[in-house]
Image: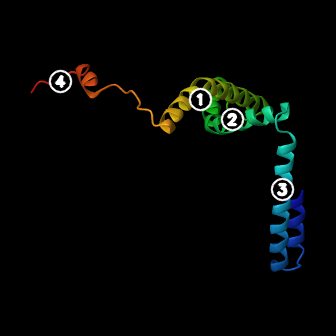
Amino acid sequence: MVIAATMVYVSSGRGYAAGRATVLAATAVFAVSMYEIAKAYQGTVIQKIDDLIGDLSYPIYLIHFTAAMVAQLWMPRERSYTFAIVVLIVSIDMTIIMNAVINPLINRLRDAVRSGEKLAFPSVSVLQGTTRRRSA
């Protein structure tokens, strides 16, 4: 609301310089108020829900287009609310599965890299033994 009010003020013709100062002040007030709200809900159920939404937001962004393509295979081509709901449900399901399967692996890898631990990868000689050479 603060940002919307600021935009109205800026577009009201009072001048760009006054508008810029107002935008900076409004942005500072907004940032401080969001920080205080986040601090007030720390350790509550609301914070856990917020963390869950935050954890799932980027994977949903990555998966929603794929989910739309998958949904199009089984649904009519017309765009409808049903299509949007199916895409949303498929996106969330795929995201939860991806988060449950891939996240622990990535977290272990990240922790190992941060701690300086040597990572075990198959050696080249093991990989070479499984390939066939062409005869000349």
Foreground label between 3 and 2: 3
| Residue appearing at x 50%, y 32% in the figure | 109
Q: Residues within 10 Å of mark 1 (few under 14, many from 20)?
A: few
Q: How far apart, in angstroms, are the residues tagged by discs 3 and 1?
A: 32 Å
Residues at discs 2 and 1 in contact (Cβ within 8 Å) = yes
- Say which mark, if any, is on residue 32: 3
Mark toward the start of the polypeptide (1 vs 4): 1
| Label whose residue precedes the other's in the sequence (3 or 1) | 3
Residue situated in front as seen by the camera: 63 or 22: 22
Alpha-carbon distance for marks 1 and 4?
Answer: 38 Å
Which quadrant of the figure has residue 125? top left
Q: Are marks 3 and 2 in contact (CB under 8 Å)?
A: no
Q: Nearer the viewer, residue 94 or 127?
A: 127
Q: Identity of the amino acid at label 4?
A: Arg
Could you say where residue 79 lies in the image, as x and y percent from the top left? 73, 35
Mark 4: few/some/many CA within 10 Å (<14, 14-19, 20+): few
Pointers 3 and 1 in contact (CB under 8 A)? no
What is the CA distance from the residue labelled 2 to the residue labelled 1?
10 Å
Which mark is first along the chain, 3 or 4?
Answer: 3
Amino acid, disc 2: Asp
Labelled disc at residue 103: 1
Which label number is shown at residue 133? 4
Q: Nearer the viewer, mark 3 or mark 1?
A: 3
Q: Earlier in the sequence, mark 2 or mark 1?
A: 2
Query: x%, y% of residue 132?
Result: 21, 21
